[in-house]
Amino acid sequence: MLNFNSLIVFIILFLSFGIFNFSFSQEKIEKESGIKPREVPSAARDWLKDSFENVQRPKWFLEHSQNGKSYEAKFHYQGHFHSVEFDSLGNVEDVEIEIKESEVPLEVWKEIQFHFESIYAHVKVEKIQRQLTASKSDLEDFFDEEEIVDVVIRYEIVFQGKNEQWELWEALFDDSGKFLSKLKVQIRLNDNLIF
């Protein structure tokens, strides 16, 4: 049986652990380092070559984040910067394509703006990406043959939001502009935004 002092210590530890976990899960922490193609799982290299046949020498990165280790290929393709993320075994996770505000459907952008205006006094958008997720074969067909079957489209936006002070965030919206999630970014802006 716990005595009163032990119970107090237990409650304090429990609450501290819960608060730590909550704040940690709400932050995006990434560290990227450039690597050579031979350091990347062959499954990732092969998928990229099959899906983007005309891409010559993509830049490869090893990424450590709150989600673990992953690999990322960055390259320019059809007028846009692309970023393809693979898990630690080389399975494709998603493809992100950097786009301009004018490339987001107008109704979707209005929804996103409405969300920002309801939360922040001021917003500066730093980067917009169209994020595509699907099975590896469906993603390959999307880029190889422009088939959109079972491909989920989302919009990932890196922005600075200000109420009392400026803070850097990454938010995710669905294909209609509905807010899904956001993470406070704990990296220097240039760490992961430069290709």
Image (cartoon, rainbow, N blue to C red):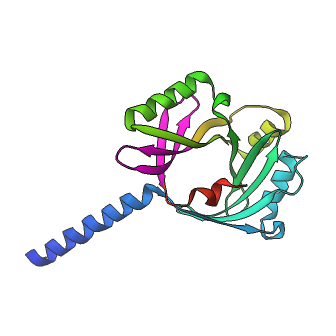
Q: Give the residue displayed 52% in from the left and 25% down from the top.
A: 110
Above or below — where is 109 with respect to 194?
above
Q: Position of residue 193 (x, y in %)?
A: 65, 53
Q: Give the residue displayed 15% in from the left and 77% down from the top.
A: 6
Above or below — where is 110 with respect to 183?
above
* Magenta-span inclusion, residue 174: yes
- What span is in magenta? 158-184
- Horizontal arrangement in the rendering, residue 129 relative to residue 164 (left or right): right
- Horizontal arrangement in the rendering, residue 114 relative to residue 106 (left or right): left
Displayed quadrant of residue 96: top right
Q: Give the residue displayed 25% in from the left and 71% down from the top.
A: 13
Q: In the rendered image, is residue 1 in sight?
A: no
* Magenta-span inclusion, residue 32: no
Residue found at the very far top of the displayed protein: 107
- Horizontal arrangement in the rendering, residue 167 relative to residue 73 (left or right): left
Seen from the viewer's position, the closer of residues 165 and 25 is 165
Quadrant holding the C terminus: bottom right
Seen from the viewer's position, the closer of residues 25 and 4 is 25
